[in-house]
C-alpha cells in the first residue's frame, strides 16, 4: 500500500475554497485515490475517489495530475460543518483482499 | 437503507477481562472490516471478513480475534484486556466485486480501567 503525505492541519474561513494536497510518490498502476472525512467520535465517511484527471461529485472535486504522484481534494465554499479530519488513501481497492491504511490525516478548521 | 450498526456504543471493562463487540453491516454487504482508533496511533486496520472467512489481518496480537456469521454480522473479541486497548473500535462494510466505498459504523468506545 502506497504511503501518503498530507498536511497535519489547515485553517480556512467560511465561504472559501479549500484545497488539500496529498503526496503519494510510490502509487502503483492499479491504485485508486480515495478521500474520507471524519468528525469527532464518528466513523470516517467516504467523500470521493478517482484514478486520473478530475472527478467531481456533489460535495467535492478531486484533481489528479498525469503522473498521479499527488492529488488535491477541493472543497468549494466551506462551512463550519466541514470542520473535520480528512484522510487521503491510496490502494488497489479491487475485488481482492481489502485493507484501508489511514495516515494521520489533515485536520481542517473552518473559522467563522 | 439502514447504515452499519455497532453495539454496544460504550463499554467499560477492567484489565484482564475480555470483551465482545458486535457489528451489523448494511444489508447486502458481505465484507466487514474492523479498525481501532486511538489518539496516538490513529486508525489502524484489524481484520476483514468476507463470507465468514478472514481475508486480511493487520498487525495486532492474537488477543484480538473476530468472526463473521452467515448473515454477515460480525463480532470482534479482545481477551485479557490491557489499558492500551482503550480505543474507539470501528466496523465498516462494503460490497465486493469492484465497489470501493466502505461504510463505517458509529463505533464502540471501549475504556479499560
Image: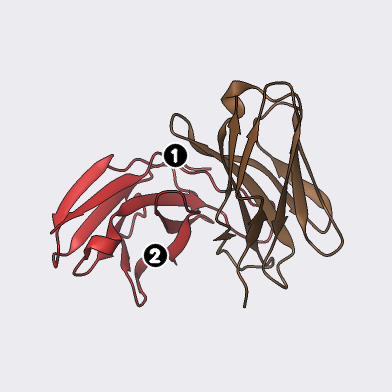
From the rendered image, report the letter of the chain displayed in brown: B
Q: Viewer-proximal residue, A45 or A53?
A: A45
**Which mark, by number, is residue B60?**
none
Please indicate whether residue A51 sits to the left or right of residue A13 in the image: right
Give the distance between the C-alpha atoms of the residues marked 1 and 2, in whole angstroms.
18 Å
From this viewpoint, is residue A50 visible? no
Q: Quadrant of residue B99?
A: bottom right
Height in image: B12 above or below B14?
below
Return the x and y of residue B37 as percentages of the image width and height.
52, 39
Check disc 1 and report the residue beneath it. Answer: A3
Return the x and y of residue B51 as percentages of the image width and height.
82, 59
Q: Viewer-proximal residue, B19 or B54?
A: B19
Check disc 2 and report the residue beneath it. Answer: A52
Q: Chain of mark 1?
A: A
Q: Which residue ends up furthest to the right in the rendered image?
A: B70
Q: Quadrant of residue A60?
A: bottom left
Please indicate whether residue B24 sits to the left or right of residue A107 in the image: right
Amino acid at each position: 500500500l502506497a504511503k501518503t503525505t498530507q498536511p497535519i492541519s489547515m485553517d480556512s474561513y467560511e465561504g472559501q475554497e479549500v484545497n488539500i494536497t496529498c503526496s503519494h510518490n510510490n502509487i502503483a498502476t492499479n491504485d485508486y485515490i480515495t478521500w474520507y472525512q471524519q468528525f469527532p467520535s464518528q466513523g470516517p465517511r467516504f467523500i470521493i475517489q478517482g484514478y486520473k484527471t478530475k472527478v467531481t461529485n456533489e460535495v467535492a472535486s478531486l484533481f489528479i495530475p498525469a503522473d498521479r504522484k499527488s492529488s488535491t481534494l477541493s472543497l468549494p465554499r466551506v462551512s463550519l460543518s466541514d470542520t473535520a479530519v480528512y484522510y487521503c488513501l491510496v490502494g488497489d481497492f479491487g475485488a481482492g483482499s481489502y485493507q484501508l491504511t489511514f495516515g494521520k490525516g489533515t485536520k481542517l478548521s473552518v473559522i467563522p | 437503507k439502514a447504515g452499519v450498526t455497532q453495539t454496544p456504543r460504550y463499554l467499560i471493562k477492567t484489565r484482564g477481562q475480555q470483551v465482545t463487540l458486535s457489528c451489523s453491516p448494511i444489508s447486502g454487504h458481505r465484507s466487514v472490516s474492523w479498525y481501532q482508533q486511538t489518539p496516538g496511533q490513529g486508525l489502524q486496520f484489524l481484520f476483514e471478513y468476507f463470507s465468514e472467512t478472514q481475508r486480511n489481518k493487520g498487525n495486532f496480537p492474537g488477543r484480538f480475534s473476530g468472526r463473521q456469521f452467515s448473515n454477515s454480522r460480525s463480532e470482534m473479541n479482545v481477551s485479557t484486556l490491557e489499558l492500551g486497548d482503550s480505543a474507539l473500535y470501528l466496523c465498516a462494510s462494503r460490497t465486493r466485486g469492484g465497489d470501493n466505498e466502505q461504510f463505517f459504523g458509529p463505533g464502540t468506545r471501549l475504556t479499560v480501567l
